[in-house]
């Protein structure tokens, strides 16, 4: 079967784990750039909700369901056009876990030992003096393989990710190469597309905005909520009129992520001129709200009509499977999971037959009847002594064919000493299996 890594068009793929409520950091770092990328011509984009990945971290079913809806609604409200892209839920594509297994079988365990997320857990356990794998599930360990399957399933060329995900993309490349090396060129080794401009957004406390720090601003807060949260952004104690530092100011960095270059320059000037923190926060509120407000109505509508989102995802899942199902069929064939009637098998059975050892019966000048077993190259594995009748020889051969090596003992009086018992046993077992 001919390998089919499709080279055009360029394919982009990205996923978000459905483990929480999208916040401004997700929006700036992932949702907004990926929606923009989806509008580029000549690019085929794949966007999915990584709900299998969520199972690694979350054991609250209702939370996974809710997060899936929230993230899908966020993407759609931010302008993702499900007609233009393939927008789907990972768990609607059962080929992905199947491919995960294929990739598992070509991935070194040592490679996974070195994955950052797994190593971080092990290091933490070691520091606490507990078992290195304490509380580490095999799911966490396998995270990179599932992610590799996400990417390779659609032969994505580029995967837009943050820096923390580069290692995963490199692993996916390795998986593609190992598989291709064994089974032919089926996969395109993917590349990470790093968004240089998308620095990580700081959270309320100045550290990276992240669920795990509990310092996030939800993307679709109401204006009042947004105002409250922005009021809580950490600033220093400089009074109104005192010049402020933009360096290390979370407020400034968040503003910058939403503003044009001129607007950013204007805020820099305001900092230098001693804008009050209260006024600066008001500017930030207005700037964020200007971008988010138009999306809010659509988000609210979708949250209140989950059946609309469900229908879109199911339609997207169909599109995804239109690619995944035949590709998986190709991969199954490549590794040898094939219909038994497929031509190659017959040819192989024939070849295997002709390479089997064979019995020979013959009469010598002494008038006695002999038999022997020789392998395909003619090497004699078993030699009988002279017997009184051809029937006797035939009977012994029948017994060896039926019972294999276990008949040797009963026949020992008819046989010359064995030359290579292991080779003989292997040959007899092969014959027995063939006859069965
Ligand atoms: N690991 C990504 C995250 O933490 C989510 C993800 C899963 C993903 N599979 C992917 C991203 C494939 C890009 C490509 O958010």
Image: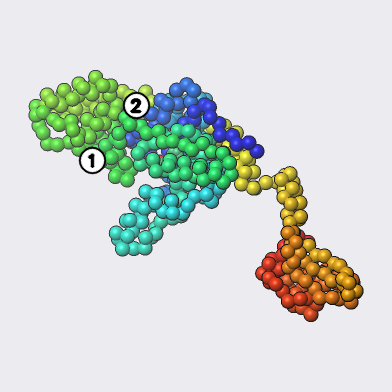
Identify whether 166 is placed above or below 283.
below
Nearer to us in this view, 202 or 111: 111
Name the side, left or right, on which 386 lies relative to 119.
right
Based on the displayed image, in which of its 4 quarters is residue 360 positioned?
Answer: bottom right
Local packing at callout 1 (Cα closer than 10 Å; few below 14, some 14-19, many 20+) is some
Residue 84 in view (yes/no): yes
Identify whether 173 is placed above or below 400.
above
Question: Dividing the image into 4 quarters, which one contains the C terminus?
Answer: bottom right
Secondary element under disc 1, as helix, strand or loop, is loop
Which mark's residue is nearer the viewer, 1 or 2? 1
Q: Residue furthest front?
A: 365
Nearer to us in this view, 58 or 424: 424
State which image quarter holds ligand 1: top left
Based on the displayed image, in which of its 4 quarters is residue 255 positioned?
Answer: top left
Return the x and y of residue 210 as percentages of the image width and height.
32, 41
Q: Residue furthest bottom?
A: 413
What residue did someone put label 2 on? 292
Name the side, left or right, on which 272 lies relative to 281.
left
**Residue that appears at 42% across and 26% down:** 37
**Residue that appears at 39% across and 31% down:** 31
The tag on residue 68 is: none
**Residue that appears at 33% across and 24% down:** 291
- Compare marks 1 and 2 and give the one earlier in the sequence: 1
The tag on residue 205 is: 1
The Cα–Cα distance between marks 1 and 2, rounded to whole angstroms, is 22 Å
**Residue that appears at 28% across and 21% down:** 260
Identify whether 207 is placed above or below 140.
above
Question: Dividing the image into 4 quarters, which one contains the N terminus?
Answer: top right
Return the x and y of residue 113 as percentages of the image width and height.
41, 53
Local packing at callout 2 (Cα closer than 10 Å; few below 14, some 14-19, many 20+) is some
């Amino acid at each position: 079967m001919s390998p089919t890594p499709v080279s055009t068009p360029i394919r982009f793929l990205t996923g978000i784990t459905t483990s929480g409520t999208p916040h401004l950091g997700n929006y700036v770092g992932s949702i907004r750039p990926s929606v923009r990328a989806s509008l580029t011509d000549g690019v085929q984009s794949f966007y999915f909700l990584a709900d299998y990945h969520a199972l690694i971290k979350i054991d609250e079913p209702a939370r996974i369901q809710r997060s899936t809806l929230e993230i899908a609604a966020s993407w759609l409200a931010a302008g993702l056009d499900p007609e233009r892209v393939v927008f789907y839920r990972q768990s609607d594509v059962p080929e992905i876990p199947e491919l995960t297994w294929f990739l598992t079988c070509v991935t070194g365990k040592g490679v996974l030992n070195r994955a950052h997320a797994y190593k971080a857990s092990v290091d933490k356990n070691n520091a606490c003096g507990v078992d290195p794998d304490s509380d580490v599930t095999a799911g966490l360990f396998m995270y990179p393989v599932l992610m590799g399957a996400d990417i390779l399933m659609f032969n994505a060329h580029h995967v837009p990710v943050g820096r923390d995900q580069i290692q995963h993309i490199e692993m996916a490349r390795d998986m593609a190469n190992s598989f291709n090396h064994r089974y032919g060129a089926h996969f395109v080794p993917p590349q990470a597309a790093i968004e240089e401009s998308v620095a990580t957004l700081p959270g309320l406390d100045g550290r990276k905005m992240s669920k795990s720090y509990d310092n996030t601003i939800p993307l679709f807060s109401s204006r009042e909520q947004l105002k409250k949260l922005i009021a809580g952004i950490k600033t220093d104690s400089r009074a109104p009129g005192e010049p402020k530092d933009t360096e290390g100011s979370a407020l400034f960095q968040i503003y910058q992520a939403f503003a044009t270059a001129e607007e950013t320059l204007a805020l820099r000037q305001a900092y230098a001129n001693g804008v009050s923190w209260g006024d600066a926060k008001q500017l930030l509120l207005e700037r964020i709200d200007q971008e988010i407000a138009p999306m809010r109505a659509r988000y609210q509508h979708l949250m209140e009509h989950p059946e609309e989102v469900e229908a879109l995802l199911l339609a997207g899942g169909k599109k995804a499977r239109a690619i995944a199902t035949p590709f998986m069929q190709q991969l199954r064939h490549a590794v040898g999971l094939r219909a038994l009637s497929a031509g190659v098998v017959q040819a192989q059975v024939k070849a295997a037959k002709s390479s089997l050892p064979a019995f020979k019966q013959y009469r010598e000048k002494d008038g006695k009847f002999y038999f022997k077993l020789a392998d395909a190259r003619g090497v004699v594995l078993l030699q009988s002594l002279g017997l009184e009748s051809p029937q006797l020889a035939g009977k012994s051969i029948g017994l060896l064919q039926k019972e294999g090596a276990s008949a040797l003992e009963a026949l020992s009086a008819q046989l010359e000493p064995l030359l290579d018992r292991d080779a003989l046993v292997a040959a007899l077992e092969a014959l027995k299996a063939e006859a069965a």
